[in-house]
Image: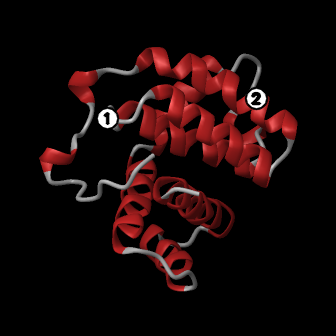
């Protein structure tokens, strides 16, 4: 498993914890990262994903809801909605990683931590969201917000 996959999984765990316990994001993330032995660049990417997802949660929920026909965000399984938020954030703000890689990772994470049906659900939603990718609105590593470069 690559460093980015690990970071995505740690970020998902933090987002899940935030969602079900209402912990402040930094505290949830610190708890997840503290109990796992993690390289600094993996921590950095997990932190960037988590904090960016939390910061843009309202916009991400609106985007997800707009493409998730007949699904309200609050009716989705907690893990699925947080995985969708996380990967939608990455799709829209990390243009150096191909959309297909982000979506494939999301599907595999959904199958691992949720259900096979979740994998199909996540794939369908993220496939629609990838069309909203806008290079002008994305952060890049050069803007100082991210310092990691782990492989996909």
Could you tell me residue 98's position as x and y percent? 42, 29
Image quarter of residue 92: top left
Q: Which SS class for mark 2?
A: helix
Residue placed under numbered mark 2 in the picture: 121
Query: What numbered label is drawn on residue 88?
Result: none
Q: Eyeballing the image, is 1 above or below 36?
A: above
Could you tell me residue 82's position as x and y percent? 62, 48
Q: Earlier in the sequence, mark 2 or mark 1?
A: 1
Residue at x-position 62% and y-position 40% = 106
Q: Eyeballing the image, is 28 above or below 116?
A: below
Residue at x-position 40% and y-position 50% = 151
**Which sits in the foreground, 51 or 115?**
115
Could you tell me residue 117's position as x and y percent? 86, 34
Q: Which SS class for mark 1?
A: loop
Q: CA distance from mark 2 to mark 1?
A: 25 Å
Residue at x-position 64% and y-position 60% = 16
Q: Residues within 10 Å of mark 2 (few under 14, many from 20)?
A: some
Q: Nearer the viewer, mark 2 or mark 1?
A: 1
Residue placed under numbered mark 1 in the picture: 96
């Amino acid at each position: 498993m690559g460093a980015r996959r690990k970071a995505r999984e740690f970020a998902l765990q933090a987002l899940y914890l935030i969602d079900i316990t209402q912990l402040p994001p930094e505290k949830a993330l610190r708890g997840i990262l503290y109990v796992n032995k993690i390289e600094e660049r993996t921590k950095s990417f997990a932190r960037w994903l988590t904090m960016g997802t939390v910061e843009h949660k309202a916009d991400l929920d609106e985007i997800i809801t707009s493409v998730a026909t007949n699904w309200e965000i609050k009716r989705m399984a907690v893990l699925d909605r947080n995985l969708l938020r996380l990967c939608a954030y990455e799709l829209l703000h990390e243009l150096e990683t191909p959309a297909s890689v982000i979506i494939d990772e999301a599907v595999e994470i959904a199958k691992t931590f949720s259900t096979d049906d979740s994998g199909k659900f996540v794939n369908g939603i993220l496939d629609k969201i990838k069309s909203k990718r806008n290079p002008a609105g994305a952060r890049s590593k050069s803007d100082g917000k991210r310092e990691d470069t782990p492989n996909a």
